[in-house]
């Protein structure tokens, strides 16, 4: 006997292109078995009243580092579980735990812990694989990445890592580095998504990278150049390349701080919901009160302060990471950027699912897909989260 069927009713179902008023969804054996535009009768089903709010697909965060006081680089299996549980409470039903620039040994340790934690992750956002951010990045665009470990792509290193860890699903790098184009091609040969990040590339280099597999820009505007001058000449940067290459996907930290409202509006106006993934890029302080925290691993990480809904360096000279949760991103796109709810939710669900190649089972509410569902009230606050039909304790 499978799990008892569930019926979610009396809600506005958010679909990729419309809202179904007074709809209902039936969940059977972890999957969506029916989506209806009326309250249908289901014998012996557990009934959940959406209270006239929204019934949305679970959010898919393809770039997240931590939360609840933990970071994926802590060297602790429990960190993976606690971060996943924290973000599930805020509507994230799937995620890509993200590593930082580190030594090869530290990276492999994080990958080993991911594999172990993935088997035990029963109450948190489902892991879709690992996102490696660095170490192959531009030194002067490293941001808060540890300069001791910044390096050019090393074929022996990445070939060995990718051979031993099939859990890696995307890898962010600076495409102008020596060997980075070959690295991108190798990633594609292993069905790993290469992304442009922490880079000094100009438009021509970004276009060359795109033509060799780099089809995603990591946290657009952060750690990259727009128009620059070299001697007397101006060059378009990665930001302009992201806009000019229609098929280039972008991810944005829509916390309202990393990108203020005018830039949120600009990215949406040019790229549209089908090419934008909302990411938290959250560090360990997500879901925690303001005050002191650590960016990166607990041992050897960078001391930061959390205030104004963002992490800052102690001297407040620079941001030092996001503390956003996925529901905040959706609200910000609606309230700060004036984006329709349907489009804002798409950027947090179906678009990132499509970018990662899991749109056949994630990212929208349709029959046969995983029952990853978020109930939102009329102000877009999370009321309930369902992970493959299992309700999460908020």
Image (cartoon, rainbow, N blue to C red):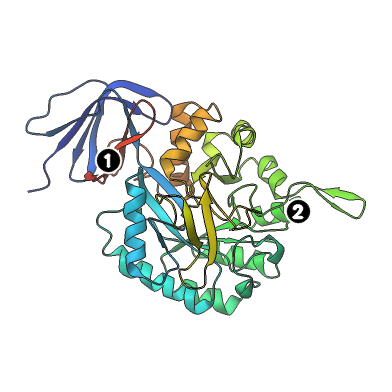
- Up the image or down, 10 lies above or below 73; here it is above
How far across and how far down the image is residue 18, in percent? 41, 24
Q: Earlier in the sequence, mark 2 or mark 1?
A: 2
Relative placement, left or right, of 364 versus 237 is left
Instruction: Please tell me how crowded label 2 is: few (under 14), some (14-19), or many (20+) other residues with Cα within 10 Å.
Output: many
Q: Position of residue 51 (x, y in %)?
A: 25, 25
Secondary structure under the numbered disc 2 in the rendered image: loop
Q: Which residue is mark 2?
A: 202
For image coordinates 61% across by 76% down, the residue present is 154
* The image quarter in which residue 326 lies: top left
Name the residue that disc number 1 marks.
Answer: 368
Residue found at x 28% / y 22%: 52
Quadrant containing the C terminus is top left
Q: Quadrant of residue 114?
A: bottom left
Q: Quadrant of residue 256?
A: top right
Helix, strand or loop at mark 1? loop
Determine whether, in the image, residue 140 is placed left or right of residue 303. Answer: right
User: How far apart are the two marked residues, 2 and 1, measured between alpha carbons?
Assistant: 43 Å
């Amino acid at each position: 006997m499978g799990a008892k069927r569930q019926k979610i009713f009396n809600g506005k179902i958010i679909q990729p292109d419309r809202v179904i008023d007074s709809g209902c969804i039936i969940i059977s054996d972890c999957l969506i078995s029916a989506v209806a535009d009326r309250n249908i009768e289901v014998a012996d089903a557990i009934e959940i009243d959406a209270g006239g709010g929204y019934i949305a697909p679970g959010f898919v965060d393809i770039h997240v580092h931590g939360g609840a006081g933990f970071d994926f680089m802590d060297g602790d299996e429990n960190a993976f579980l606690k971060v996943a549980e924290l973000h599930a409470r805020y509507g994230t039903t799937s995620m890509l735990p993200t590593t930082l620039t580190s030594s090869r040994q530290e990276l492999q340790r994080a990958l080993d812990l991911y594999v172990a934690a993935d088997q035990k992750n029963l109450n948190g956002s489902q892991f879709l694989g690992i996102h490696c951010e660095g170490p192959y990045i531009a030194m002067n665009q490293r941001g808060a990445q540890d300069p001791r470990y910044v390096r050019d792509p090393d074929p022996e290193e990445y070939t060995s890592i990718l051979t031993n860890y099939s859990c890696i699903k995307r890898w962010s790098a600076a495409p102008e580095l020596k060997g980075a184009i070959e690295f991108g091609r190798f990633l594609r040969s292993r069905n790993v998504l290469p992304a442009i990040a922490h880079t000094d590339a100009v438009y021509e280099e970004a276009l060359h990278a795109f033509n060799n597999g780099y089809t995603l820009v990591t946290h657009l505007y952060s750690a990259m150049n727009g128009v620059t001058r070299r001697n007397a000449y101006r060059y378009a940067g990665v930001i302009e390349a992201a806009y000019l290459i229609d098929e280039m996907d972008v991810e944005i930290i829509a916390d309202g701080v990393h990108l203020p409202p005018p830039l949120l509006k600009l990215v949406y106006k040019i790229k549209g919901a089908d090419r934008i993934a909302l990411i938290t890029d959250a560090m360990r302080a997500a879901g925690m009160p303001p005050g002191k925290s650590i960016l990166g691993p607990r041992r050897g990480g960078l001391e930061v302060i959390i205030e104004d809904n963002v992490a800052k360096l102690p001297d407040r000279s620079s941001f030092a990471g996001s503390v956003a949760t996925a529901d905040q991103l959706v609200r910000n796109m609606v309230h700060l950027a004036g984006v329709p709810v349907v489009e804002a939710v798409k950027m947090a669900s179906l678009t990132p699912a499509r970018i990662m190649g899991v749109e056949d089972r994630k990212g929208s509410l349709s029959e046969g897909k995983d029952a990853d569902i978020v109930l939102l009230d009329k102000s877009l606050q999370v009321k309930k989260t369902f992970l493959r039909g299992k309700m999460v304790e908020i």
